[in-house]
């Protein structure tokens, strides 16, 4: 089945960023099998559309993404990118909920 794949390179890059926020473009390109330039262009696309953000940490970058962004395409309307990423092995982090306030009972 060489020649085609089910997921686009954009989806694969986003999946790797979601699973490994400190991954480099070089590492992404090696895993996917595309050039580093193509990887950087995909990262620019994802950043321009608001799917990912980059933050400088020392000499490296840390990526974050918004799992609530919609999937692009007519047939995927109403589905979030996080839904696809969960299928591909990304683990959604549970938000820590604050402990309910304890009320002091005063005897009457």
Image: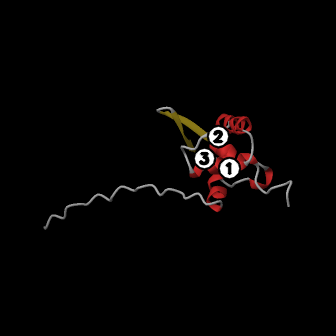
Q: Nearer the viewer, residue 42 or 60?
A: 60
The residue positioned 67% from the left and 39% from the top of the image is: 46
Q: Position of residue 6 (x, y in %)?
A: 79, 57
Q: Nearer the viewer, mark 2 or mark 3?
A: 2
Q: CA distance from mark 2 to mark 3?
A: 12 Å
Task: Report the disc number at residue 43.
Answer: none
Image quadrant in which the C terminus is located: bottom left
* Between discs 1 and 3, the one toward the N terminus: 3
Q: Position of residue 102 (x, y in %)?
A: 26, 60
The secondary element bearing badge 3 is classed as helix
* Between discs 2 and 1, the one toward the N terminus: 2
The quarter of the displayed image where residue 100 is located? bottom left
Q: Nearer the viewer, residue 12 or 74?
A: 12
What residue is disc 2 on? 26
What residue is disc 1 on? 31
The residue positioned 70% from the left and 37% from the top of the image is: 36
What residue is disc 3 on? 17
**Horizontal side of residue 29 vs 1, given as left or right:** left
Label 2 close to label 1 by CB (< 8 Å): no
């Amino acid at each position: 089945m060489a020649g085609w794949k089910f997921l686009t390179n954009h989806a694969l890059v986003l999946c790797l960023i979601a699973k490994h926020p400190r991954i480099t473009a070089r590492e992404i390109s090696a895993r996917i099998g595309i050039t580093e330039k193509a990887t950087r262009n995909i990262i620019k696309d994802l950043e321009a559309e608001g799917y990912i953000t980059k933050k400088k940490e020392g000499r490296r970058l840390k990526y974050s993404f918004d799992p609530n962004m919609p999937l692009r395409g007519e047939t995927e309307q109403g589905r979030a990118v996080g839904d696809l990423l969960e299928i591909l092995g990304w683990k959604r982090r549970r938000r820590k909920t604050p402990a309910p306030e304890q009320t002091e009972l005063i005897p009457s």
